[in-house]
Image: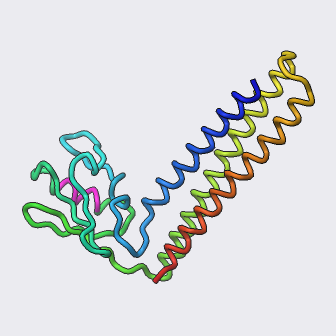
Amino acid sequence: MIEQTLSETDSKMKKAVEALTRDLAGIRTGRASPALVDHIKVDYHGVPTPLNQLASIAVPEAKMIVIQPWDRTSIRSIEKAILKSDLGLNPMSDSNVIRITIPPLTEERRKELIKVVHKRLEDARITIRNVRRDSIEKLKQSEKNKEVSQDQNTRAAEQLQKLTDSFIEKVNSTGQDKEKEIMEV
């Protein structure tokens, strides 16, 4: 019972850290990355569709993203979606591809992005703590049902805390890495 709870907790916390990593990849830095535009929803024939399902996204240079739609009629919709996004990017297109040049970040914009990163880090920490709380409640319930002893429950709670601390440390180091990336000139 305890091992199962700990392994479920570990897997849920891993998923929270993975979600944070994916989320932070979409925050703009000074470099081009396909992850910047992957998540943008494009109105494709009335259906909001992720951009990465409508086009191939390439990074031929450090400061440029090239989007090549599989359906050329969707170029206008893709441009509109990119302009509507909060990324502050300006797409330019010819008849076949859309090119996005990544402008350098201003100091003010860097500070705004760091605030966004901090908020997402805190959300990830809260998610991890909620997983811990749910697991502790499961352990207390199993103790109440006489499935485990109080000593076993106490040891399991200590293991849960160690697990939580290690994942919070991963969240913090991920955040520090992203901050360095954003502050790079």
Furthest residue in direction right, as rendered:
151
* Quarter of the rendering occupied by the N terminus: top right
- The residue at the point 69 percent across, 58 percent down is 169
Q: Position of residue 104 (x, y in %)?
A: 38, 80
Q: Give the vertical position of 59 relative to 150 (above or below).
A: below
Q: Position of residue 97 (x, y in %)?
A: 14, 62
Q: Give the vertical position of 69 relative to 174 (above or below).
A: above
Kindly report the secondary structure that dominates the magenta region of the rendered protein: helix
Q: Give the vertical position of 133 relative to 138 (above or below).
A: below
Colour scheme used in the picture?
rainbow
> Is residue 18 toward the left or the right of residue 64 in the image?
right
Q: Give the vertical position of 130 relative to 52 (above or below).
A: above
> Is residue 174 toward the left or the right of residue 76 in the image?
right
- The residue at the point 45 percent across, 60 percent down is 25
Q: Position of residue 10 (x, y in %)?
A: 65, 40
- The residue at the point 22 percent across, 65 percent down is 66
Q: Position of residue 151 (x, y in %)?
A: 92, 30
- The residue at the point 9 percent across, 60 percent down is 96
- Viewer-proximal residue among 115 and 12: 12
Examine the structure image and report whether residue 7 is included in the region drawn in magenta: no
Image label count: 0
- Viewer-proximal residue among 117 and 9: 9
> Is residue 158 toward the left or the right of residue 35 in the image?
right
> Is residue 141 toward the left or the right of residue 50 in the image?
right
Examine the structure image and report whether residue 80 is included in the region drawn in magenta: yes
Query: Quadrant of the rendered structure where residue 26 is?
Result: bottom left
Q: Which residues are magenta?
A: 76-82
Furthest residue in direction front, as rendered:
3
